[in-house]
Image (cartoon, rainbow, N blue to C red):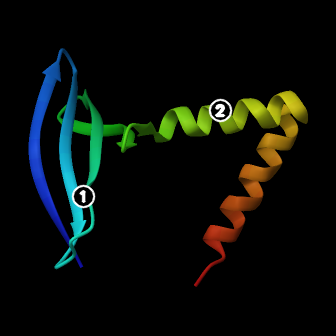
Amino acid sequence: SYQMSYDGEQAQGAETTVRTTVRPAGSQTSPIRIEYKLRRRRESWIVFDVITDDLSLVRNYRSQFNRIITQKSFAELLRRMRDRLANVEGSP
């Protein structure tokens, strides 16, 4: 159970950043800042990045993908992604 608060938004052209804060309900722990980066596509919005405490999900994946491609190969990256997808789809 979490408490989420909406902290505002900032629009720039077709992109908007929505800022939120999340904290476990009834907890005195420090809140976690989460920003959602959205892009307008036709009549809807699409989340293209999630930033948690200044760490970008997209940058993190890009770094991991580049490391695998550099150390192994693009084929190895695709194999790992397919394996991971098969494990998720096969999960109950």
Callout 2 amino acid? Ser
Quadrant of the drawing holding the N terminus: bottom left
Q: Residue at x 11, y 56 (%)?
A: 5
**Who's the residue at 26% across and 60% down the image?**
30
Left or right: 36 in relation to 52: left
The answer to whether 11 appears left or right of 30 in the picture is left
Q: Position of residue 18 (x, y in %)?
A: 19, 38
Frontmost residue, 30 versus 71: 30
Which quadrant would the C terminus be assigned to in this image?
bottom right
For label 1, the SS is loop
Up the image or down, 24 lies above or below 33; here it is below
At x 50% / y 35%, what residue is drawn? 58
Name the residue beneath numbered marker 1. Answer: 31
The relative height of residue 57 versus residue 3 in the rendered view (above or below) is: above
Residue on which disc 2 sits: 63
Spot the residue most to the top.
13
Numbered tag placed on residue 71 in the rendering = none
**x%, y% of residue 71?**
89, 33
Quarter occupied by residue 26: bottom left
Secondary structure at badge 2 equals helix
Contact flag, marks 1 and 2 (Cβ < 8 Å): no
Q: Residues within 10 Å of mark 2 (few under 14, many from 20)?
A: few
